[in-house]
Structure formats: structure tokens, C-alpha cells
Image (cartoon, coloured by chain):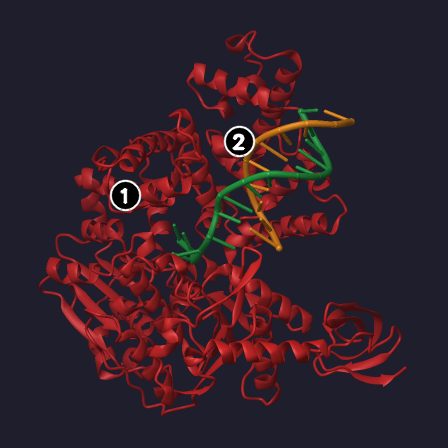
Chain colours: A red, B green, C orange
DNA sequence: ATCACAATACTTTTT
DNA sequence: GTATTGTGAT
């Protein structure tokens, strides 16, 4: 049976378990995704399940794609019939199909974080609450937490002042979502659960339709997701879940690793299988990981073991500041690459917060080395991208008031605050959304709004309404990419965004990037495109093609593995993060996050911290992370940052400054010089200038084109001139 | 109505 | 130090 080839006895036991509730508790690097994939294939091949009868839930879209292709390889055919994706994506699909009878239509849009916040602000305003006294973010977090726990507005505990406020905002917020014909992320789960709870026929239909359900990363499911699983799998569940409570890192998003315990209570007949052998890391890495996680009270210890041998020691390094930290990374990777110990693509740099990527990017840029940055948020969060998405969403769903308000006067078209206010009031009076009012005006239905709009403003709005109606029309037949073309042309968006400055050009390039993404999106349907945009995960942006180091947050690193790992910012306040200091559970989660980070490593691990670190512009001295003290000294080499005294640190700082003052005071290179670079080959210097303590050289390389390099980081060999 | 500049919070992690 | 919001001038 080739489906079981290369699997160890525990893995085989899991793959071939009898249908029914199965809980696989798997340590890091134990091949749990592999088990899941083989189980999928086993269901089809051995238990003759039809692929359409399988629903598999993964944590990211990328994981879903990977599982599809791996399972397809195993089966020697297409697995596309399997319903595979994240909880959110699967729920969105179900809701679009079954929207009849619900208070929204199947063209609903999904609101992202920023839209949700805008709605909370709006709710606060209509309730006459000052956003300065009631923080919208806090209220939104509370609402989201409630939704993840399946708590309806009426049931929201209003025992405190904040609770009372939140409850009222929650009510209002839900109504606003409906009037926008929009759902937020939590709604996707909430409405699906509601629908299945209340509609027995539908529930039975889905239970029959998906007799087999598999779930990856089960420790990161929340109450709503767990309830959903229970609803979908009764009365005779074939539910196969895989997870590791030690790797639970999404508590702040409502995830509850106690779902693992709940599972065993709710399904007492569940078969429980442990996967303990690790195929990823050296024993040194595993020993360090265990030392970190074993400090966690109240957990079931497990022994991680491998037959890979001890491997190299973990390197500890203390840098002076974040620029120095980044430079250490770049230099170390450069030297590992130069000696052939690792490929650039084998290396990965992890950090606690996204903001920490900036100094890294600068260092890589200065050294003229490419890198891969994981983070979709940042692209889709850009103003110009949000604008165009708002246009698309409005076309898909004219009731989307948040998107309408965003782009009504973007680019400026003579509809200022006053005009917008009039429009909103007219919509309120007519009992329809402002988008519909515009469409009415475009059709010439002035009667109903007679005397409401002044001549100029009325004309502007009718004009925009006609545009909107026109786009609405062509959207039915045109692929998304061409629709975007039309939008840009009709609105003069390029002229608006690209003002010739460097920033303007960059913004326009982003627009082109979105356009490319739309072209690549084969399905062509607007709804599907918008859904994908709303539900992209960070990891979805990881390109496999480039052989370059990867930069990502520790959260985004979940489920991945790399030969060489750097974990940066091991300073109190950064990692563990400041916000977790008062809350024991939050601190426990930080520790698990560190555990996740360490266990991504196959061979070499570098733990780095800074002596001083800038926050809010001013920099201050930091203390080493408490986690560093938990790594046994016999596993490490390099400094003992955890035990360094302040005097030693300040002495180091002194010597640092001395060495920096030896930096060039006049250029070492001249324009016209012929140079050679180890990576880019030969080229001619175009320009050179001094930048603080460094010299920046612009070189036109024969093969690689123009590059800007830092003289101190890149070894340029002068050939002539 | 629009733009330029200034003051002001603000940074955890993400579907 | 930066993104966002608010204010005042055009």
C-alpha cells in the first residue's frame, strides 16, 4: 500500500484509523500535515469516499493549496472536488449559497479590520459617544471576542460601564453591517452557526453532504469554529483533527486550546494518537525547545526526540541596536552563503512585531541582497489599493456604504462634506442605502428627492451614479482586470495618484500590481476575487520562486520550517511583548510563541537581542528577554546576554562607538571606477555619496543592472580607475 | 472644495 | 518616528 510508504507506526495508525472521532496530538515537526494529507488520500482510496464528501479545514489558504497538490500526487489525480480551505472561506461559500431567508444577500461583501473600525466609529457617533473616551479599538475587540464566543448582543454582559457601552455599540454595529449588506470575519462563522442551528433540514443536508471532516491546527480553533464542527458532524461524526496545544498562539483571536479537552469530553469514543518523533530538528534544537516549554505550568510534558543527532550549538548574539542587529543577520547569512553552508533561501528571520522588519529591509537593501517579506496586510492596507477595492466592492454591492463614503470624492469630483451629508440624510429618509439613491438619481428619478439636492451637487451625484450604473452593467460580463482598467480610466485615477513624485510612482506601481493579481485570478468573477482579497493570509504572499532569505513574524512562521532561523528582538518588552506583562495567560502564549519559533529550525538557530532599542523615536536600554535564561548554557555558544551586567554592556557600547568613528570621512570610490561585486559581477560606478557613517555607491552592473550598495557591507573590488 | 501643514495619538500578533 | 486626523488658508 503506497499510501503508507515511509510512515512510522504512529503515523500509520493515524492514517488508517477507523472512521469516527480521531484526535491526533502531534509535536512540532512530527509530520502532522503529512498525516492529514495521507488520511485524505486514504479516505478516497481505501474507504472509497468520494472527494466531494470530504471537507478539510486548514489554517491558511496556502496550506489548503499545498494539501490539494500533495494529495493529488498521492492519488495520481485531481483533488479539486474536496472542499478545502480555511473556516472563513468555507463559511463564506456556504453563506452565499444559502443566503435566502437571511438578512443579507449573496452579494454581501466582507469587511476588513479597517472597515469594521469605521463602522464602530459610526456606531459610537450615532450613540453620541465620544471616541476619545471610548476607544473604538477596545470596543471592537470586545465585540469580536463576544462573536467568537457566540454571544449575541442581547446576551452581552452589561455589568460594567464599559460592558454597557459595548453592548449598545454591538447592537448598533450589527445593524449597520446588515444595512451595508456586509459581514465581518466573525460574522462568517456566526451566521453559519446560526443558520445550521436554526435550520434542521439544512443541517441534515450538510451532514449528509460532508460525512468526512478533517481539521488542521485544531488547537487554534475558537468556540464558533468548534460549534460549527459539532453541528456539521452529528450524528455519526467522522471527524479527524490534528493539533498541538503547545503551539496555540491565537488566544487573542478567540482561539481556545481547551477545545482539545472539550473534544475528548464531547467525543468520549475518540481515538487519541500521539506523534512524538520529530523529523525536522537536531536534538540540540529540541532540547532548547523543551527547556522553554517545560517552564510552562500545568501542561502535559512530552519528550521530543529525533535520530538526527545533536547538531550545532545555538548561537546567542547581543547587538548594539536594531541596525546592528540587522547587520549581524545580513553578515551571518552572507558568510553562510559564501562558505556554502546554506543557500540564501534556507535562511529565515523571525520577529515579534511587523515594525521590526524595517531595519532588516534597510540592511538587506544596503547590502544589495534580495529578501522575501511575508505580509499581505501591508499591500492590501495601502491607500490606493483600498480605494480600488472599495470601487470594486461598491460595484458588487451598492449597499456598501463604507466603501461608498471612501471613494465618493476620491479622486475629488466636487462632492464635499456638505453634499455627502445631504446624500446620507436623503438616503435615511428614503429608507435605502446612499448607493441606491445615487443609482436612482442616475436613472432620472428626481421626483422622490425633489428639492433636496442643489443644482451642482445634484448633477455631480447623478453623474457619479451614472458611472456606477455603467460599471455595474459591464461587471456582469467583463473579467475583473478589465473592470479595473475601466475604473481607472473613467475616474482618472492614475493622474490622481501618480503625481510624478517618487511616492506617487510607487503608489501607481502598487495599482499595477493589483491589476496583475486580477489578471492572474483565473475565475474572473468579481465576487470570488473580492472574497480572496478579503481572506488572504500573510503566508499567501510567500513566493517560492526567489532564492532569498524570508522575513516574517513568528505568527506567520507557524507551520513552516527552515534550515537556518534567526529570532530577533529577544528583549523584555519586545519578546515577550510589553502587553503581556500583566496577564499570565498572555505571557504563557508568548512562551508558546517562542517555542513555535525555535521548533521551526532544522539545523541552525541564532537568538539575537539588542542592548538598546528605539521605540517612539527615542531609544532606551533594554533588558534581555526572560526566555533567554531558559536555554541551557551547554546548548549555546556566543555571548551570555542573559547574564551580562550593565557595566559590561556600556563598555561594549563604548568600544562600538570608537569603531564606528573610524568610518569613512571621505569617499573611497569615485564615479567612473570599474569594480567587481561577488554577486553582481563587474560594473561601473555612477555615483557615490557619504551617508552618516557609511558610503553609498550606485553601480551600473553589466549583468545585474543598476544597484545601490553600501561600501562597508558589500566588498567591492576596484578593477581600474 | 481642496490643499498644505501641524498636532496628535499610536504599535502586538491576523482570518 | 510615523500615519492619521484636524485646522486654516487659498
Q: Callout 1: 10 Å neighbours few (<14), some, many (20+)?
A: many
**Where A307 sits versus A215, above or below?**
below
The one of A71 and A553 positioned closer to us in this rendering: A553
The one of A483 and A572 positioned closer to us in this rendering: A572
Chain bearing mark 2: A
Chain bearing mark 1: A
**Where A122 sits versus A112, above or below?**
above
Residue reaching furthest front? A647
Disc 2 element: helix
Tell which tag, 1 or 2, sits nearer the viewer: 1
Q: Name the side, left or right, on which A692 lies relative to A400.
A: right
Residue at coordinates 34% horizontally, 81% vertically from top-left?
A288
Whole-percent x, y for residue A598 in the image:
39, 76
Disc 1 element: helix
In the rendered image, is residue A513 in sight? yes
Which residue is identified by label 2?
A404
Distance from label 1 to label 2 (Cα)?
28 Å
Residue at coordinates 59% horizontally, 20% vertically from top-left?
A419
Q: Name the side, left or right, on which C1 lies relative to A106.
A: right
Q: Callout 2: 10 Å neighbours few (<14), some, many (20+)?
A: many
Quadrant in which the N terminus of chain A appears: bottom left
Whole-percent x, y for residue A163 in the image:
27, 37
Which residue is identified by label 1?
A146
Q: Which labelled disc corresponds to residue A644?
A: none
Amino acid at each position: 500500500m503506497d499510501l503508507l510508504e515511509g510512515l512510522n507506526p504512529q503515523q500509520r495508525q493515524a492514517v488508517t484509523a477507523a472512521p469516527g472521532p480521531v484526535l491526533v496530538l502531534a509535536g512540532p515537526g512530527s509530520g502532522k500535515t503529512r498525516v492529514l494529507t495521507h488520511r485524505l488520500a486514504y479516505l478516497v482510496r481505501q474507504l472509497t469516499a468520494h472527494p466531494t464528501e470530504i471537507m478539510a479545514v486548514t489554517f491558511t489558504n496556502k496550506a489548503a493549496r499545498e494539501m490539494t497538490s500533495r494529495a493529488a500526487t498521492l492519488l495520481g489525480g485531481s483533488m479539486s472536488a474536496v472542499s478545502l480551505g480555511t473556516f472563513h472561506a468555507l463559511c463564506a461559500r456556504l453563506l452565499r449559497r444559502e443566503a435566502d431567508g437571511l438578512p443579507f444577500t449573496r452579494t454581501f461583501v466582507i469587511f476588513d479590520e479597517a472597515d469594521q473600525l469605521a463602522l464602530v466609529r459610526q456606531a459610537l457617533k450615532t450613540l453620541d459617544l465620544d471616541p476619545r473616551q471610548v476607544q473604538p479599538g477596545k470596543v471592537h475587540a470586545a465585540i469580536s471576542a463576544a462573536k467568537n464566543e457566540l454571544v449575541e448582543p442581547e446576551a452581552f454582559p452589561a455589568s460594567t460601564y464599559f460592558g454597557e457601552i459595548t453592548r449598545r455599540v454591538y447592537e448598533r454595529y450589527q445593524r449597520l453591517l446588515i444595512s451595508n449588506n456586509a459581514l465581518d470575519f466573525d460574522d462568517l462563522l456566526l451566521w453559519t452557526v446560526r443558520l445550521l442551528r436554526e435550520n434542521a433540514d439544512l443541517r441534515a443536508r450538510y451532514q449528509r453532504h460532508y460525512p468526512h471532516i478533517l481539521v488542521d491546527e485544531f488547537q487554534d480553533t475558537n468556540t464558533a469554529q468548534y460549534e460549527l464542527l459539532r453541528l456539521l458532524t452529528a450524528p455519526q461524526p467522522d471527524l479527524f483533527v490534528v493539533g498541538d496545544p503547545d503551539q496555540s498562539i491565537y488566544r487573542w483571536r478567540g482561539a481556545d486550546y481547551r477545545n482539545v479537552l472539550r473534544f475528548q469530553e464531547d467525543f468520549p469514543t475518540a481515538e487519541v494518537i500521539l506523534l512524538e518523533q520529530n523529523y525536522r530538528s537536531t536534538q540540540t534544537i529540541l532540547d532548547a525547545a523543551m527547556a522553554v516549554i517545560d517552564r510552562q505550568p500545568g501542561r502535559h510534558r512530552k519528550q521530543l526526540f529525533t535520530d538526527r543527532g545533536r547538531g550545532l550549538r545555538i548561537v546567542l548574539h547581543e547587538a548594539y541596536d536594531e541596525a546592528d542587529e540587522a547587520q549581524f543577520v545580513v553578515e551571518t547569512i552572507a558568510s553562510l552563503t559564501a562558505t556554502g553552508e546554506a543557500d540564501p533561501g534556507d535562511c529565515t528571520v523571525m520577529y515579534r512585531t511587523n515594525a521590526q522588519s524595517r531595519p532588516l529591509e534597510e540592511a538587506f537593501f544596503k547590502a544589495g541582497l534580495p529578501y522575501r517579506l511575508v505580509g499581505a496586510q501591508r499591500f492590501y492596507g495601502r491607500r490606493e489599493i483600498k480605494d480600488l477595492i472599495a470601487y470594486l466592492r461598491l460595484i458588487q454591492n451598492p449597499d456598501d456604504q463604507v466603501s461608498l463614503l471612501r471613494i465618493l470624492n476620491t479622486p475629488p469630483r466636487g462632492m464635499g462634506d456638505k453634499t455627502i451629508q445631504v446624500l446620507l440624510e436623503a438616503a435615511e429618509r428614503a429608507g435605502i442605502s446612499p448607493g441606491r439613491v445615487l443609482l436612482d438619481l442616475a436613472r432620472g428619478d428626481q421626483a422622490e428627492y425633489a428639492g433636496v439636492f442643489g443644482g451642482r451637487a445634484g448633477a455631480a451625484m447623478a453623474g457619479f451614479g451614472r458611472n456606477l450604473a455603467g460599471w455595474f452593467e459591464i461587471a456582469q460580463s467583463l473579467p475583473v482586470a478589465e473592470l479595473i482598467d475601466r475604473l481607472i480610466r473613467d475616474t482618472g485615477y492614475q493622474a490622481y495618484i501618480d503625481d510624478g513624485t517618487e511616492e506617487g510612482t510607487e503608489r501607481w506601481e502598487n495599482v499595477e500590481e493589483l491589476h496583475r493579481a486580477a489578471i492572474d485570478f483565473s475565475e474572473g468573477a468579481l465576487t470570488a476575487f473580492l472574497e480572496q482579497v478579503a481572506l488572504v493570509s500573510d503566508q499567501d504572499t510567500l513566493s517560492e520562486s526567489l532564492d532569498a532569505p524570508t522575513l516574517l513574524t513568528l505568527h506567520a512562521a507557524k507551520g513552516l520550517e527552515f534550515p537556518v532561523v534567526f529570532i530577533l528582538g529577544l528583549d523584555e518588552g519586545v519578546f515577550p511583548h510589553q502587553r503581556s506583562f500583566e496577564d499570565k495567560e498572555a505571557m504563557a502564549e508568548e512562551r508558546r510563541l517562542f517555542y513555535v519559533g525555535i521548533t521551526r529550525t532544522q539545523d541552525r538557530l541564532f537568538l539575537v537581542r539588542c542592548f538598546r532599542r528605539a521605540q517612539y523615536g527615542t531609544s532606551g536600554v533594554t533588558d534581555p528577554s526572560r526566555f533567554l535564561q531558559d536555554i541551557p548554557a551547554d546548548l549555546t555558544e556566543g555571548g551570555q546576554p542573559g547574564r551580562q551586567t550593565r557595566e559590561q554592556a556600556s563598555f561594549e557600547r563604548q568600544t562600538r562607538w570608537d569603531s564606528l568613528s573610524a568610518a569613512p570621512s571621505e569617499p573611497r570610490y569615485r564615479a567612473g571606477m570599474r569594480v567587481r561585486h561577488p554577486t553582481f559581477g563587474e560594473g561601473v560606478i555612477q555615483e557615490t555619496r557619504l551617508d552618516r557613517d557609511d558610503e553609498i555607491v550606485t553601480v551600473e552592473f553589466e549583468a545585474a543592472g543598476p544597484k545601490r550598495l553600501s561600501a562597508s557591507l558589500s566588498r567591492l573590488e576596484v578593477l581600474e580607475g
